[in-house]
Amino acid sequence: MSLLHDSMRFALRYHADQRRPNAADEPFALHLAEVAGYVADEGWPEPVVVAAWLHDVVEDTPATLEELRSAFGDAVAGIVEGLTDPEVYAGLPLEARKRRQAERLARLPDEVKVVKLADQVSNVRSVVDDPPVDWDADTCLAYLTGAAAVAAACRGVAPRLEALLALHHARGVAKYRGAETDGAGLDAF
């Protein structure tokens, strides 16, 4: 089997029972596939697509970086490590966590940035189309603001993903502020 296939199986096994906390109760695996698909569509090499499949496995499951390093190598484990929030971020309010993510990302390699950007596209689209059931409009707007800061830290690695994120961001701002958008939010990044 290929490294890509192995990463998909690994991620699906560890995330098997996880679901998005939205009304559709989507399997979390759909998010992983979406993120990996965006990275692959941008033409990044296999280790980066593998890391996209695995991007949440250390943060959200019992899997460890050592397991990833053993199964997928240093390059993949390094990307996933860059995508894994340090434990000190866990207790921070949403805005502060996103700000810290953006500050940290600015210093990381492009391989980490493209996966994070793809992750934010998926998450922002989800927040706009079917947000977590316990989020109000203010929380959704705070997430969108944080995602814009994260996207700014990733500027230049994937212009098509940046444009897609800007589009979903503008839709979300219009939806949660209850205002019409004239495209003004598209250059927010």
Image (tube, rainbow, N blue to C red):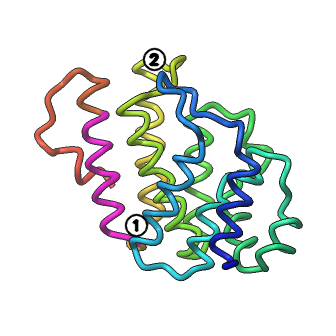
Q: Is residue 33 left or right of residue 155?
A: right
Identify the magenta region: 158-172
User: In the figure, 36 relative to 126: above or below?
Assistant: below
Q: Nearer the viewer, residue 64 or 53?
A: 53
Q: Crowding at label 1, few (<14), some or many (≥20) Cα neighbours within 10 Å?
A: some
Q: Nearer the viewer, residue 98 or 31?
A: 31
Instruction: Give the prevailing secondary structure in the magenta stretch.
Output: helix
Q: Is residue 144 left or right of residue 168?
A: right
- In the image, which disc is placed on residue 136? 2
Q: Is residue 99 left or right of residue 171?
A: right
On residue 155, the disc is 1
How many marks do you count on the picture?
A: 2
Q: Amino acid at mark 1?
A: Arg
Question: Residue at position x 34%, y 60% from top?
Answer: 162
Report the residue at 46% width, 63% height from top: 37
Q: Is residue 10 magenta?
A: no
Where in the figure is residue 85, as x and y percent of width and height?
A: 71, 51
Q: Label 2 neighbourhood size at 10 Å, few (<14), some (14-19), many (20+)?
A: few
In this view, the mark in front (2 or 1): 2
Quadrant where the N terminus sits is bottom right
